[in-house]
Structures are given as structure tokens and as C-alpha cells.
Amino acid sequence: MGQYKDLRFPADFLWGTATAAHQVEGHNTNNNWWAWEQTPGHIEDGTTSGRACDWWNRAEEDLDRAAALGQNAHRMSVEWSRIEPRPGEWDETALTRYRQIIGHMRRRGMEPMITLHHFTNPLWLEERGAWENEETIVLFNRFVEKVVEALGDMVSLWCTINEPNVYAYMGWADGVWPPGKRDIRTAFKVMRHMARAHVVAYRTIHRLQPDAQVGIAHHERPFDPLRPGSALDRLAASLQNRVFNECIFASMYSGRLSLPLGWGRVPEAGDESEFMDFVGLNYYTHEVVTFDLSRAGELFGRRLVRDGVELNLFGEEVYPEGIYHCLKKFARYHKPIYITENGTSDHGDDRRRRYILQHLVQVQRAIAEGVPVRGYFYWTLVDNFEWAKGWSTPFGLIYLDPASGERRPRPSAELYAEIARANAISRDILEAGC
């Protein structure tokens, strides 16, 4: 007998993958990201999304592949610029297409989780200042109402907004995503507006669909001190953690703004005290921080990579224990938790298989300790256009040739399928260790 035993997951656990509309649909020519891609230098490898994975025409094929690989769920987003191409004008053909895709999921026994905002805005909204403009709270709610009325009979799991902290940081602090600004005060304004928009959307969805489960997909990136015994390193890590991880999530959960430059009750919150039915966790890595007096703009924290650790294609540390710590942290909210994204980029596949196994072991560890994890969505199903990285960082369980559209499942897809079908990590997999 070996030293390992099967690691089992709860009954009815969701095993899926996650995608975003702009990254897979193709030819989303009416949004801010398409416009951003057309300027040389904005995308690292010089590519554009183009036809992407051609999901507007071929989504069912890839969902069939997912179902054949044992997946019983899929997280996807709907593209605002397709559904509302001009202010107040609705494209019923686009909504019908989304119904077709979601209906196909249902027929294949897959639970859909639908994200309503995943980084992209219609050009007409961008021209009005998008999330810098308070008016967007109302406009987004109008869009949410339309989508839920059209799709709600087939969907019970809704993510209002994907990674508002990443969206604000990359677009308004780092400036490498649209609109390409470096203005931290405006970044906080964007996050305030998104927090308020989530509260409004939460109430709208429940008005239309009382039994719906509504949350956000929150990017949690733990900040750990380089020297745990150093009070200054601990302070720097704590400050960065609060601003990046804590503020926006707390605001969206409680309806009470806890963002820098924006305190107090969300005006739209009313008498309710909670605005989240589940926690959506996006986890990829952590940051190691040391105190640096010269980094006032980064709250006196300098981020670094430790020697001898495994890195992904973004130069980030592969740190499986981090997902366990995040799950333990979010258990305090006493809400169901879905891992709405977790994955790694890998030109081969040795790294990806190991990454999946190591992280799922940590997920099961948290479950065994009572954390209410209800599902896991690997990022992503098929190689896609990875925002400012272009096509250079493949995350897919399924290889995609962007030029020809050829698909080919990787060995990691078979590993994930074996785990999903068994609803367990078998002793044999653990002994092999990938």
C-alpha cells in the first residue's frame, strides 16, 4: 500500500473552465479593447484578437469538447457591445445567440455561470468616460436588467463584475490596459463606481430572479512579507494587501465603501447588509514584499521574486499554498465559494499538469477543513487572446492554432478530465505526481 489515498470532493461539485467573451468570440469590433489593440505597442507580441477562437460561430464545438472531458459547468461572459451596440438600442440577434450557447450547455449537462462585465466596454460608453463616469452605474444596471430578462430562465449563477481591482489597476495605475492612464485617484473612483454598480445590479437581479445566486469574480493576490520577522516588511505587505485585495471586495460585499478616497455607505444599498450570495475567487499567484522607503507610490513596498522558485510565463511565482490560504480567509464570510479562475500559461504542458494537481490538492485540503468550496473553473478551456500579452501566453487545456483554428487537447486536459469524472484526485495520480 502506498502512502497516498484518494482525495474526494463534495457531491455536486462543479468542474469547469472559464472564458471571457472578447478573448474567445472574435471580431468584437465595437468595444474599447478592439480599439486599443489597433495601436502598435499596446499588445506585447504585436498581435490582435481578430477572430480569436471564433466562438461566435463555434462555441458549441468547444463546449462539446469540454463535456466530453468530464466538465459539468462553464463560466463565460456576455459582451456588452454586442448586446447594446448603441445607447439604448438592443441587438436581439446577439441575445438569441447567447441563448443558443447557454442552451447548448444545458443540454450537455453543464451549469452556466454568466459574467456580466469582463473588462470590455462598448465604444459609445468609453466615449462618455465609462467607469470614470457615475452615469455608468445606471447604464450598467440597464444592461444587466436586459440580459437577466433575456437569459435568466437558463441561468442561476451570475457574476456581476470580473476583477474590478485588476481592471482599475491595469487601466488607471499601471496604464498598460485601456484607457492607458496613470492616475491613482481616478483608479479609486473607478473602483467606487464599480462597487456601487455591483450593489445596484445585485438588487436588480434578485428583483427579477429571487432565487438567483449573485457574486463577483474577485482577484485575490496575497501580499506576503519577505522577512516575516520584520515589522516594516509586514507593514508594507499589509498596506498593499488592504488596497488591492480588501477594499474593493469589502465594499461590494457589505455595500459600505471602504476604499481610499471614498468612505461611507453605498447610496444605493438601502437597509440591506450583504450583497453577495457566493464568493468568486480568481487566484494565480502571490507577491513577496519588502519595505522600501523610496516606493511611496507603492505604499513603501517593493515586490520581488524569491530565488529558486518556479515561475510562470508572466514571471510570477507558482505558489499553490496561496489558494488554500485564500479559501481559508474567505470562509469567514460563511458563503459558498467558487474558484472562478485558476490556471497557468505554458508553451508545453508539463508545467500546467503539475500546476493543476498542486492547486487542486490545496483546494481539497481546504474542503477537508470545512471550507464551503462548491466548484472549480480552470482558466481556460482553449488558448485565447490574453489581453495585453496577445497570443504569447497559452492557458488552454486545449491547444489552438490562431491562424488555422485547429484544436488539440493537451495531456493536461486528460488529467483534469480524470479528476472531474471521478470527482476525486486518485491515489494513482498523486503517486505519479505529474
Image (cartoon, grey):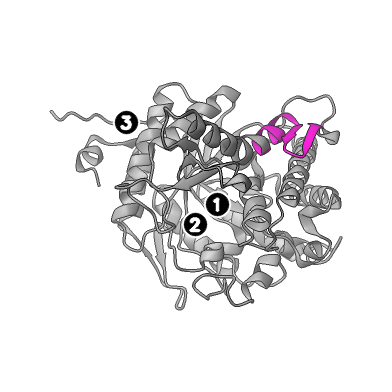
Mark nearer the viewer, 1 or 3: 3
- Cα distance between the residues tagged 1 and 3: 28 Å
Nearest to N terminus: mark 2 or mark 3? 3
Distance from label 1 to label 2 (Cα)?
A: 7 Å
How many angstroms separate mark 2 from mark 3 (CA)?
Answer: 27 Å
Q: Tag 3: Cα neighbours inside 10 Å, few (<14), some, or many (≥20)?
A: some
User: Label 1 belongs to which residue?
Assistant: 105
Marks 1/2 in contact by CB < 8 Å: the verdict is yes
Give amino acid for label 1: Met
Does the magenta run of residues contain 259? yes
The amino acid marked with disc number 3 is Leu
Residue receiving disc 2? 63
Q: Position of residue 333 (x, y in %)?
A: 60, 24
Q: Nearer the viewer, residue 277 or 183?
A: 183
State the residue lying farthest toward the front: 293
Q: Secondary structure at mark 2?
A: helix
Residue sitting nearer the eye, 269 or 315? 315
Q: Which numbered marker is on residue 260?
A: none
- Name the mark nearer the viewer: 2 or 3: 3
Image quarter of the N terminus: top left
Taking the spot 64% from the left edge, 41% from the top edge, the residue there is 216
Q: Where in the figure is residue 290, as x and y percent of width and height? A: 47, 40
Q: Residue at x 56, y 47 (%)?
A: 294
Q: Is residue 82 left or right of residue 7?
A: right
Q: Is residue 78 visible?
A: yes
The residue labelled by disc 3 is 7
Range drawn in magenta = 248-264
